[in-house]
């Protein structure tokens, strides 16, 4: 999440001072480029690994600070949510066995983290979106208590002027609102870095945009959110909306969201990307004791450009420019942010190898391609890949190619040549690009595996239990470091997590979310036909705000109609009210006890906001408990 030595901007003079520092940084950057301060060198690669933490029941665990303390390693750091961690991997030159070295380092860090997590009976999992994540895990109590995170959430909320809203149309629809930026915590990524020569930066940055669609298509791994089947890479939609500070009251004016792909090719200089960020996005954070970069240059020093970097860290292009410097001098990097974590460490390094190989294997015939190519082609390809993964057709310089054709016939050979060009070991090239090759041949990726097995598991258990079982199996395959094309499909012999469930299951794991309801002003005739059509004995009664206000029983309705002898009247005349309710995160044991106490056989389930989100019947509950006891 960037620089932690930050604070929110207090007032107009504070904002003006920060802006002066950023402008000074940009001027210093232009001077450095003009004076050739950036020396060409052998490019380096790097990566950042984001991780989810789950408890023994495979639910999100709020233990990142305790685990970090036990790990005691500066390469590990916290993230926005208490159920996330991040590993910063060592930069290394793009040559020799760099890829296998990076994989070995990643596995070592994951093993170290898992050992610390096990002390708290937790597991680590790398996945684009944690399948067992629920909306209740996005409440404010789940934000890591670090000033930067609270400051960002507060300022984004104030800029927006209303709650953050998520609306995604996929196979299912998702429409939710939240008062903090914790929707962003749904996303877990494997961020990849490649050092770029400033002389070639414009062309390379545009090339990174052009290849983003097909790279994302073969690497998608985030098809589910809160049990809803959405996009192949749902992170793209969630992240964009999670910190969208644009007000919904002025839709006629075109304004760029802080998470964006871009609106046009980069045409002149890498500095233009920093200028665009200042011109388009309000300043959010500042810091004390910022240095004047032009003065640093005059003193013969290479400046940090810290003010520009702080602002850059609050804008989120999917291919983001990064500035840094070391003993070798200043450098630029492109940070590829759109690829998800997982499915396995091997898969992630294969994605890195493919992306870096493509970046370095750009054919001479396609240099300066952007001068005669419509930018919207690249953007359309990216959005299609995010929605549909590798089941799309791409526009590739006028040719209409399936993902399989483009990836297998054109891009995979290009990536091989790019890695060979920088003398990456043939063994590394074969190991990692063969993973991509198998995914292409089988037309499968992490998103495909999740959807297939989620649907299959739901034929024998509730959606919530299916998500837990799937999460358990994902951890098993990851710990073996198997690439996703070798992951088994679930079958009766592979169901491995249900016997491990020790705690009483939660209501959310077996409740029904697809049900009929009525309002108090609905006619009794309407209610009676619903009972007949859907063979149910209970109908929750909710008001116009979605709050449960009563319960209608078929037996009670029939008794009323028989006594009255007519079908006239309204639900409010017959319903039971008030009616007991529970929340989804309470146990089924609590539900069973409450239903026995109140002598009812159906219980409405309500959210934190008191909205009706599900129902649970005594028959379903006791049937589930009997099955669990048998296991």
Image (spheres, rainbow, N blue to C red):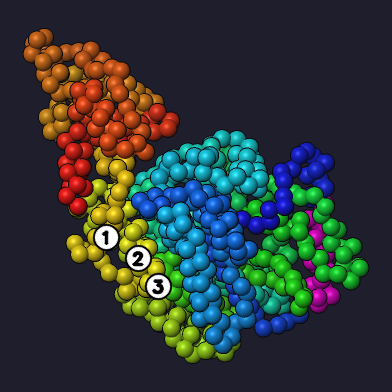
Q: Quadrant of residue 600?
A: top left
Residue 2 versus residue 16: which sits nearer the camera? 2
Q: Is residue 513 left or right of residue 238?
A: left
In the rendered image, residue 42, in percent from the top left (x then y), is placed at 67, 83
> Is 126 a magenta residue?
no
Q: CA distance from mark 2 to mark 1?
A: 9 Å
Specify the quadrant that holds the N terminus. Answer: bottom right
Residue 303 versus residue 166: which sits nearer the camera? 303
Picture disc at residue 496: 1
In the rendered image, residue 562, in percent from the top left (x then y), is placed at 8, 13
Q: Residue at x 40, y 72 (%)?
A: 481
In the rendered image, residue 391, in percent from the top left (x then y), is placed at 35, 66
Q: Is residue 422 above or below residue 194?
A: below
> Is 29 a magenta residue?
yes
Magenta extent = 20-37
Q: In the rendered image, which residue does mark 3 sit on?
A: 481
Q: CA distance from mark 2 to mark 3?
A: 9 Å
Q: Is residue 296 left or right of residue 511?
A: right
Q: Is residue 384 left or right of residue 514?
A: right
Give the secondary structure at mark 3. loop
Q: Is residue 1 above or below residue 30?
A: above
Give the secondary structure at mark 1. loop
Front disc: 1 or 3: 1
Residue 578 versus residue 224: which sits nearer the camera? 578
Q: In the rendered image, which residue does mark 2 sit on?
A: 476
Q: Residue at x 77, y 62 (%)?
A: 305
């Amino acid at each position: 999440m960037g620089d932690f030595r930050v604070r929110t901007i207090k007032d107009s003079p504070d904002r003006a001072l920060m802006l002066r520092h950023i402008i000074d940084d940009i001027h210093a950057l232009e001077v450095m480029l003009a004076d050739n301060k950036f020396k060409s060198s052998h490019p380096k690669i790097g990566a950042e690994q984001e991780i989810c933490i789950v408890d023994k029941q495979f639910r999100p665990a709020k233990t990142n600070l305790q685990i970090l303390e036990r790990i005691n390693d500066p390469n590990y750091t916290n993230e926005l949510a208490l159920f996330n961690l991040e590993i910063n991997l060592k930069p290394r030159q793009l040559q020799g066995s760099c890829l296998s070295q990076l994989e070995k380092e990643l596995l070592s860090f994951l093993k170290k983290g898992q050992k610390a997590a096990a002390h708290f009976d937790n597991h680590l999992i790398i996945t684009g979106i944690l399948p067992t994540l629920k909306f209740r895990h996005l409440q404010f109590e789940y934000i890591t208590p670090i000033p930067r995170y609270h400051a960002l959430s507060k300022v984004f909320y104030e800029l927006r002027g209303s709650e953050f809203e998520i609306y995604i149309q996929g196979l299912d629809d998702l429409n939710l609102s939240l008062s903090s930026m914790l929707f962003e915590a749904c996303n877990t990524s494997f961020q990849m870095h490649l050092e770029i020569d400033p002389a070639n930066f414009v062309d390379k940055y545009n090339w990174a945009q052009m290849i983003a669609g097909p790279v994302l298509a073969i690497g998608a791994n985030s098809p589910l959110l809160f049990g809803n089947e959405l996009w192949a890479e749902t992170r793209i939609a969630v992240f964009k909306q999670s910190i969208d500070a644009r007000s919904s009251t002025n839709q006629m004016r075109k304004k760029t969201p802080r998470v964006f792909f871009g609106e046009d090719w980069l045409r002149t200089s890498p500095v233009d990307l920093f200028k665009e960020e200042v011109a388009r996005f309000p300043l959010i954070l500042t810091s004390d004791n910022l240095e004047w970069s032009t003065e640093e240059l005059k003193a013969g020093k290479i400046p940090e450009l810290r003010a520009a970097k702080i602002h850059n860290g609050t804008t989120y292009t999917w291919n983001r420019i990064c500035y840094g410097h070391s003993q070798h001098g200043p450098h630029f990097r492109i940070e590829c942010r759109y690829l998800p974590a997982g499915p396995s460490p091997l898969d992630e390094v294969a994605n890195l190898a493919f992306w870096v190989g493509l970046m370095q294997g750009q054919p001479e015939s396609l240099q300066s391609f952007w001068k005669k190519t419509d930018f919207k082609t690249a953007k359309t390809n990216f959005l299609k890949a995010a929605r549909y993964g590798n089941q799309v057709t791409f526009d590739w310089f006028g040719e209409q190619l399936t993902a399989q054709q483009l990836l297998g016939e054109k891009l995979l050979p290009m990536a091989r040549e790019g890695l060979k060009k920088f003398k990456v070991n043939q063994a590394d090239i074969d190991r990692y690009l063969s993973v991509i090759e198998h995914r292409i041949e089988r037309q499968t990726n992490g998103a495909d595996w999740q959807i297939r097995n989620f649907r299959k598991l739901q034929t024998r258990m509730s959606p919530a239990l299916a998500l837990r079982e799937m999460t358990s199996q994902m951890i098993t395959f990851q710990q073996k470091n198997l690439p996703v094309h070798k992951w088994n499909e679930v079958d009766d012999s592979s169901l491995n997590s249900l016997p491990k469930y020790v705690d009483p299951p939660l209501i959310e794991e077996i409740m029904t979310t697809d049900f009929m309801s009525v309002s108090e002003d609905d006619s009794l005739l309407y209610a009676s036909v619903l009972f007949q059509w859907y063979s149910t004995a209970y109908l929750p009664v909710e008001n116009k705000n979605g709050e449960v206000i009563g319960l209608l029983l078929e037996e009670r309705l029939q008794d009323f109609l028989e006594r009255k002898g007519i079908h006239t009247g309204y639900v409010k005349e017959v319903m039971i009210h008030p009616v007991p309710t529970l929340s989804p995160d309470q146990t089924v044991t609590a539900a069973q006890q409450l239903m026995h106490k109140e002598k009812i056989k159906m219980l409405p389930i309500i959210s934190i906001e008191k909205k009706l989100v599900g129902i649970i019947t005594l028959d379903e509950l006791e049937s589930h408990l009997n099955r669990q006891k048998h296991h």
